[in-house]
Amino acid sequence: MTNKLKYFIGNWKMFGDIGSFKIIYKINQFSSKYRKLYKIKIVLCVPNTLIYFFKKKLKSKHLSLGVQNCHYHQESGPFTGSISATMLKNAGAEYVILGHSENRSEGETNNLIRKKITSALNQKLNVIFCIGETYKEKNKGNTFSILRKQIKNSLKKNFSLNKIIFAYEPVWAIGTNKIPKIKELKNTIKFIKNEFKKIFKTKKSAIVLYGGSVNPKNICLFSSISEIDGFLIGGASQSSKKFIDIIKNYYK
Ligand code: 13P
């Protein structure tokens, strides 16, 4: 097990209320101790309704908070029901998840995602940029071409690339208890890292997380893939115990 920095990012999706602060509190306590043993970065991406309250209550450097989407328009405007990157930043968000397949499935295109990333980066938010193929695309052998397209069409060469974290989330693995074969996953993560270098003509390595049905049991399987820089965890991040067990079991 290397001691390279690993990210454990929770995506709460549509979950949580004021009382859910106890989950954050417990994870924060765990993080304050565990960070002395391992190089870990914990981020919890919560609903917009909670970010301000959690941020005010947390006052901690052991855990960062983020949100799960933003509007493409930078500041304020006639966009009923939408929230801009500026508003989210002012409410305390440090990270924002963009391009999640649950939003892509509601019509979010690579082009729209690019505009949202532009907005988020202008506010100096860290972007967790999700990419991934559907089951149909995988079966047709199109995984790599889909990933390439998502990267090429959503990112621009002049972006602050060091503020972007990739999350490879195969759509068919989200909330299904299915995970990719370890060898296949290793190859895909390597592909994303190579593609990043090629497209942006850089020697820097991209940070690439895996997401999709990660739980305290299967996390041990991923430890063998040194190329993975961390995990984007959905359902299991809604429980402090499961989230903490994922981290502990990863280092077992
Ligand atoms: P699950 O961990 O619930 O499969 O969700 C993954 C995900 O969508 C994280 O963004």
Image: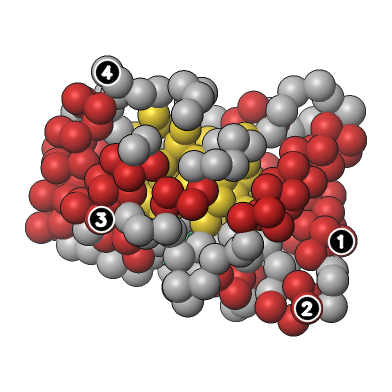
Q: Are marks 4 and 1 in contact (CB under 8 Å)?
A: no
Q: Residue 177, how many percent across, how many down?
A: 45, 73
Q: Are marks 2 and 4 in contact (CB under 8 Å)?
A: no
Residue ID for mark 3: 242
Q: Amino acid at mark 3?
A: Lys
Residue in front for this viewpoint, 129 or 208: 208
Looking at marks 2 and 1 on the same chain, the residue that comes earlier in the sequence is marked by: 2
Q: Amino acid at mark 4?
A: Lys
Whole-Å distance between the Cαs marked 2 and 1?
A: 13 Å
Instruction: Report the residue at 14% width, 42% height from top.
Output: 26
Whole-Å distance between the Cαs marked 2 and 4?
A: 43 Å
Instruction: Report the residue at 51% width, 48% height from top.
Output: 222
Residue 9 falls left or right of residue 124: left
- Callout 4: 10 Å neighbours few (<14), some, many (20+)? few
Looking at marks 3 and 4 on the same chain, the residue that comes earlier in the sequence is marked by: 4
Q: Amino acid at mark 1?
A: Ser
Q: Amino acid at mark 2?
A: Asn
Q: Which mark is residue 145?
A: 1
- Callout 1: 10 Å neighbours few (<14), some, many (20+)? few
Asked which secondary structure carries label 3, the reply is helix
Q: Is residue 244 above or below residue 60?
A: below
Residue ID for mark 2: 139
Q: Are marks 2 and 1 in contact (CB under 8 Å)?
A: no
Kindly tell me whether mark 3's CB lies below 8 Å from ligand 1.
no
- Callout 3: 10 Å neighbours few (<14), some, many (20+)? some
